[in-house]
Image (cartoon, rainbow, N blue to C red):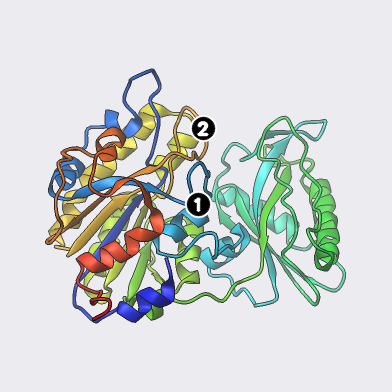
Amino acid sequence: MDLEFVRSLIEPAQTKIVLMVLDGLGGLPREVRGPTELEAANTPHLDELAAEGICGLHVPVGPGITPGSGPSHLGLFGYDPIEYQVGRGVLAAMGIGFDLQPDDVAARGNFCTVDDEGCVVDRRAGRIDSETNRRLCQVLRDIRLPNVDVFVQTVKEYRLLLVLRGPGLSGDVTDTDPQATGASPLEPQPRSPRAEKTAALVGQFLAEAKKRLADQHPANMVLLRGFAERPDWPRMEQVFGVRAAAIAAYPMYRGLARLIGMTALETGEEPEDEVATLERHWDAFDFFYLHIKKIDSAGEDGDFDRKVRLIEAADTLTPRVRRLDPDVLAVTGDHSTPSMLKSHGWQPVPVLLWSRHVRADPVEEFGERACMAGGLGATLPATHLMPLMLAEAERLKKFGA
């Protein structure tokens, strides 16, 4: 989607849009011809929305491409995820409100568990709590590296942030997270000559971290990924003409929202808290991104039944959103996280779009197979959802004479 082209068609309006993202919504059956997690869930309110609106499946990045959370969200916000790429480190930094400078290099980290041979046995260190994380970050915080400042900050649970600040740094460094158990952490490597200094510094940091964490359990090592420098991207208000707010409990999603100019509202941990935040701030913004995370976590844990229950819980919140009387309400996931894969998947994601003007299709329930037959089609590019929401909200004028 060409942002400059969309910008040229924007016109003012008093309408309100809600984009409700059920993270990792898409799934797969656990037995042949059985239901997916969404299809197995009892979702009367989402089914009602689907029957009144128009449905389909969206493709986050491209056919067969398994997306990360950053690219898949950028697509939903109308930004081409191939053109607008950023490492998880920047998102983690922005998410916790770290004052990231233009020449800083940031990396997202996991505290992990390694065995006596140095192989990863748990990439998330048993999902340690944030208080344990803060204590461990304090252990690492006074590591010194030549000619750079080192910042180590807690993000949430097992996640941490590493920022290097100094001259001549580059984010063009490979991940040290092998993304698998049974493998040793990888050595940071430069992807370009410009990054040789940074890769060497990261290697020094990790060697010292390994020593300092050796007696800790279960978090006795650090994995790093998503090295990046902060980009300068067009803001949503400039491009789409909306005052946009993000309601997300997890820092990475707040960070991504801030990167494109959304106001990240303070909210509680639970989906009920997030909807209450939406209600409190309803009059102050035109566009609301409402993110519900734990559905994705259940998929990554391979827990089909828990994912079903969390989808059902999200469904019960939908009437509260509708009572606010949005002009446009879209419900979807950023990507699929089938519990049988225990990871993100490449499968297209169910999406429903409701508005006062929408041309309803024959779909009467919200699920993968039903949405395949919906009016939005089974391969809608995710970047097309934003202009569709704007059009339904009467925020796009006619193109041409």
Q: Position of residue 92 (x, y in %)?
A: 57, 61
Quarter-of-image position of residue 245: bottom left
- Residue 219 location, x and y as percent? 68, 41
Q: Out of 134 and 301, give the one closest to the viewer.
A: 301
Residue nearer the viewer, 126 or 374: 374
Residue underneath mark 2:
342
* Residue 383 left/right relative to 181: left
Q: Locate residue 315: give its quadrant.
A: top left
- Give the quadrant of the C terminus: bottom left
Q: Position of residue 144 (x, y in %)?
A: 83, 65
Mark carried by residue 162: none
Instruction: Give the side of residue 36 with respect to residue 13, left or right.
Output: right
Q: Residue lying farthest front?
A: 401
Quarter of the image for the N terminus: give it: bottom left
**Cα separation between marks 1 and 2:** 15 Å
Q: Position of residue 238 (x, y in %)?
A: 40, 80
| Residue 144 in sight | no
Dot 1 amino acid type: Ser
Say left or right for 323 vs 194: left
Q: Is residue 319 above or below residue 121?
A: below
Q: Secondary structure at mark 1?
A: helix
Three-letter residue code for mark 2: Lys
Mark 2 crowd level (few <14, some 14–19, many ≥20, 10 Å Cα): some
Q: How many marks?
A: 2
Q: Secondary structure at mark 2?
A: loop
Query: Disc 1 designates what residue?
Result: 69
